[in-house]
Amino acid sequence: MSIMTTQEIMEILPHRHPFLLIDTVEELEPGVRVVAKKNVTFDEPYFAGHFPGNPVMPGVLIIEALAQTGAVAILSQPEWKGKTAYFAGIDKAKFKKKVLPGDTLILETEIIKVKGPIGIGKAVARVDGKLACSAELTFAIG
């Protein structure tokens, strides 16, 4: 059972449709780790052009979904309430599996380092237990 709905996520993140890329939060340890879920549906706006007749979720949007997941972990802490987490870097990104309409992305981001308003998260996205994407994401709180 989810511990956070889309509406509750929108109370933490500034993202809105069509750019809010996580549907629910399944597990949360504020400042430490979060697991979220994204149900990838055929009517996602990017599928119209990526690619006609062969819809594939763009890798950059999988990375963004992972970043939003990590932002929930950071911004759910009282000291960062109402702030925004911005991308400051992406390292070691690898894509291992196509993400298609009908897939459910399980997004996990673990915060591995924080120094002041800068941090790094280790992020993985899976579909049916299989690795789709992994990366290290650097963020800055503003």
Image (tube, grey):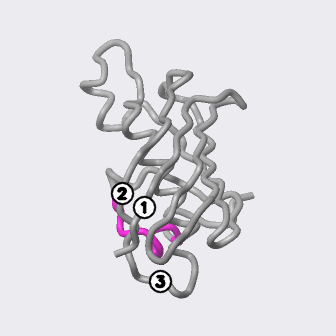
Q: Residue furthest left?
A: 49
Image location (x, y in percent) of residue 38? 54, 45
Closer to the eye: label 3 or 2: 2
Would you call the spot at circle 1 few (<14 residues within 10 Å), some (14-19), or many (20 or more)? many
Magenta residues, start to end: 8-16
Instruction: Decide if residue 5 is on the left or right side of residue 51.
Output: right
Up the image or down, 15 lies above or below 31; here it is above
For numbered disc 1, what is the local secondary structure? Answer: strand
Residue 81, label in figure: 3
Q: Quadrant of residue 73?
A: bottom right
Q: Residue at x 56, y 86 (%)?
A: 78
Instruction: Decide if residue 40 is on the left or right side of residue 77.
Output: left
Image location (x, y in percent) of residue 51? 30, 19
Q: Which residue is mark 2?
A: 88
Q: Which residue is mark 1?
A: 139
Instruction: Decide if residue 54 is on the left or right side of residue 36.
Output: left
| Majority secondary structure of magenta residues | loop
Q: Which of the two discs, 1 and 2, labels the residue nearer the N terminus? A: 2
Residue 31, label in figure: none
Would you call the spot at circle 2 few (<14 residues within 10 Å), some (14-19), or many (20 or more)? few
Quadrant location, the N terminus: bottom right
Q: Residue at x 68, y 65 (%)?
A: 28
Q: What is the distance, in whole Å, between disc 1 and disc 2 at their CAs?
A: 5 Å
Q: Amino acid at mark 1?
A: Phe
Q: Residue at x 59, y 49 (%)?
A: 122
- Whether tag 1 and tag 2 are in contact, CB under 8 A, the answer is yes
Q: What is the distance, in whole Å, between disc 3 and disc 1 at their CAs?
A: 15 Å
For numbered disc 3, what is the local secondary structure? Answer: loop
Q: Which of the two discs, 3 and 1, labels the residue nearer the N terminus? A: 3
Instruction: Decide if residue 41 is on the left or right side of residue 2.
Output: left
For numbered disc 2, what is the local secondary structure? Answer: strand
